[in-house]
Amino acid sequence: MVIRRIASLLLVLAAVPAASAAGATHEKGAAPLEISHGSRVRLADYLVPGKTTVFDFYSRYCPTCMSLKPGIERLHSARAGVAVVFIDINRPGCKGIDWHSPVSKQYDVPSNGTPLFRVYGPDGKLQAERKPAFRLVTGRLN
């Protein structure tokens, strides 16, 4: 009897993450969401419906990333139609930029490529990535 209850509970618990991930929708919070910490991630799970979603792949060991971060946070706060999601490419305990993390490899983050941006429109479709996305997000012409 106890074994049957445990087995039933395990089946229910196993189904919960799958159901949550399949129907996951995120809302824009007061601050940008920070995800990954080196782990693989599915960006579609973090799109904010009806908002332009900016994904910023960064490392705290990247001087450019850290100098841009306050402005990217302000973009998230100031623009109701824009949601920012920071993707930390570093695995826990890694010192220096983690070019070999699973998420770095998954999204082909080049060794001279942080920060790397991907911008999705309110419809969930990719609008810009890499240099065009960097220009769009930062307003820079270079």
Image (tube, rainbow, N blue to C red):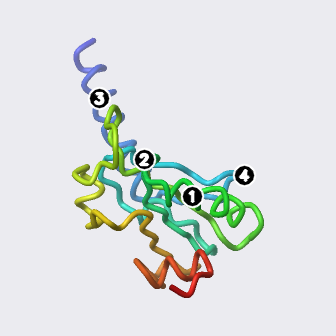
Towards the viewer: 26 or 89 = 89
Residue of label 3: 10
Give the residue type that dot 4 points to: Ala
C-alpha gap between disc 3 and disc 2? 41 Å
Q: Are marks 2 and 4 in contact (CB under 8 Å)?
A: no
Residue of label 4: 30
Mark 4, residues whose alpha carbon is within 10 Å: few (<14), some, or many (≥20)?
few
Left or right of 52? Residue 77 is right
Left or right of 80? Residue 109 is left
Residue of label 2: 61
Residue at 68% across, 53% down? 29
Give the residue type that dot 3 points to: Leu
Is residue 1 something that shows in the picture? no
Q: Are marks 3 and 4 in contact (CB under 8 Å)?
A: no
- SS class of the residue under badge 3? helix
Is 2 above or below relative to 76? above
Give me the disc on residue 57.
none
- SS class of the residue under badge 1? loop
| Of the two numbered discs 2 and 1 in the rendering, the one whose residue sits closer to the viewer | 2
C-alpha gap between disc 4 and disc 1? 13 Å
Mark 1, residues whose alpha carbon is within 10 Å: few (<14), some, or many (≥20)?
few
Is 11 above or below relative to 114? above
